[in-house]
Amino acid sequence: MGMIHGGQMTVEALLKKGVDKIFSVSGGHIFPVYDHAENSPIEMFVTRHEQAAVFMAEAWARMTRKPGTALVTAGPGFGNALTAIANVKLANIPLVLISGVVGLNSNEKLDLQDMRQLPVIEPLVKKALCCYKTERIPEYIDMAYRIAGSGCPGPVYLEIPIDVWNGSVEEEAIKKIHTRVEARTVDLEKVGQLMDLVEKAEKPVFIAGSGAYYSGAEKEFTEFIEKIGGPGFTSSQGRGVISDTHPLCFESSTLIRPGAAFDALAVTDLVVLLGNRISLYYAFGDIFNPDATIVQVDINQEEIGRNQSIDLGIVSDIKAFLSEANRMIDERGRSDALKQKFQPWIDFLREKDKEQKEMAGLTWESSEAPAHHMRICAEVNNFLDREDDIVVGDGGDTQVWMSMTRTIRQSGHYLDSGLFGCLGVGLPYAQAAKLMYPDKRVCLVTGDGSIGFNFMEFETCIRKKLPVVVVICNDKQWGMIRHAMEVKLGRFISEGSDIGMVDYHKMVEVIGGKGYLVEDPDDIRPALEDAFASGATCCINVMTDPRPISPGSIALAQMGGVDVSKFME
């Protein structure tokens, strides 16, 4: 059959796993892949920094619900990827990071970019692998993708020494494994137990989280909510699993978003978590009515009971679980009775939702200049009103304000860093979204601090002809840091919180994009209209009020047990 090179083996194995995009920055230790991918169906998308490459692969995975792929070189390239991998891990994103490393024959010789990479990354990934034999490259690639995408998803690291990659072996010596794993496990008995609890409840709350999104449970969750007439909430990557515009959807379950969540969770008698982790977003469980019955359904058994005693824990795929629950509702014939019973609860939540949004409207509609963050976010939200528009949030305060404002009509169409709170995700996420959906409008809303992390991805967007529109909330400071200092210390320290005026729009113009400086909030929408009509990569630099303090800044100040109750009054 002849000899086959390790690079060719790699490309063929990746194609078998359905990989058509690899996000990367080139380097000597990964030349074999570049060499054999060049004339293959795989597109090698090169960014300006390895962190951005991994963020792009992460966004790709979020939107496709399949493992994304990033490729980095040894040593510094590997090191640059670590922060992004930590973000991926905490968000449970399926991703395979492939890295080069010095050759086996160069160990302990002080070769170029020598580094013991495997023990560094092991705590940050679902599994860390190293392939030591050229003929086993296809096995390891199959293994990496299988682990990343099965069960509770997460990142997998695969390193291949350069001399292993450069090797050639007889093709007949290769064991070509190709396995697809899809488990839709469901505990039928516990579906019945849940339905018993639903029928006894008066004020239930149903929350679809990331697990609902990754299982593809949009249809099943919406149908479940409609069959019983109960309130649907969403969280994290579950946002959009049921559209925010659905009459039975009360949007985000987190308390920072104006709406009914606080009142719902304070008085509910039944909380049903569908693919949710009980994390900071739920004050580690302390926001739930202590007298409520808590049900947690999750594919990952280890997550059930974290931070909170669970009355009914169910290990299950969310889509399969809801499908069975919907069948059981029909079988029991209780749909109309449940709708009637829960109607007063729905009416109560609608009233609370209206009250909270009327209060938030004071900032969403503020005409003060410089603009309030929420006015900027509201302008973006109102302009990008199509079901398939994509909005990305990045930053500290800015990401918080955007998540408080965005109406999400479709799952996978709002992206932010999530629980890791990692700055710099915005441009890579946005360009990945535009790469995947060239006909959809993509807008990034970011802070002036966070835009600096991967600023040169503006050049990538321009070079790759990806016309994203970037709105920068420019308050001339690290806003979340300054405000948290003010709350915690009673003052702010200029070094570490001040940035000053930067003409980001002019910088984008210099490298071939289009820039706008907005000083009057009434000019935000005209700038958006012109930017999207231009078909160019655009930067809208909006002068922003430095004074408002977001709930995220309050939370940051509370780290270490500082009492901010007086401030919050």
Image (cartoon, rainbow, N blue to C red):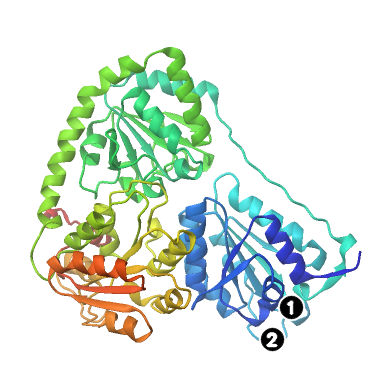
Q: Could you tell me the amino acid type at mark 2?
A: Asp
Answer with left or right where residue 6 lies relative to residue 340: right
Residue 106 image position (x, y, % from top left): 75, 82
Position of the N terminus, as image quadrant, is bottom right
Residue 418 image position (x, y, % from top left): 38, 56
In which image quadrant can residue 96 be found? bottom right
The circle drawn on residue 83 is none
Residue 488 visible? The answer is: no
Residue 562 image position (x, y, % from top left): 22, 59
Answer with left or right where residue 176 lies relative to residue 370: right
Q: Residues within 10 Å of mark 1 (few under 14, many from 20)?
A: some
Which of 30/198 is in front? 30
Residue in view at x 75 percent, y 73 percent:
165
Residue 72 image position (x, y, % from top left): 59, 73
Answer with left or right where residue 140 lies relative to residue 468: right
The count of marks equals 2
Q: Are marks 2 and 1 in contact (CB under 8 Å)?
A: yes
Q: Residue at the far right: name it.
A: 1
Which of 423/41 is in front? 41
Q: Earlier in the sequence, mark 2 or mark 1?
A: 1
Q: Residues within 10 Å of mark 2 (few under 14, many from 20)?
A: few
Q: Report the residue marked by disc 2.
A: 111
Residue in view at x 39 percent, y 53 percent:
413
Q: Secondary structure at mark 1?
A: loop
Which of 175/19 is in front? 19
Residue 428 visible? The answer is: yes
Answer with left or right where residue 151 lies relative to residue 289: right
In which image quadrant can residue 260 be found? top left
Q: Report the residue marked by disc 1.
A: 103
Residue in view at x 31 percent, y 47 percent:
283
Q: Could you tell me the amino acid type at mark 1?
A: Gly
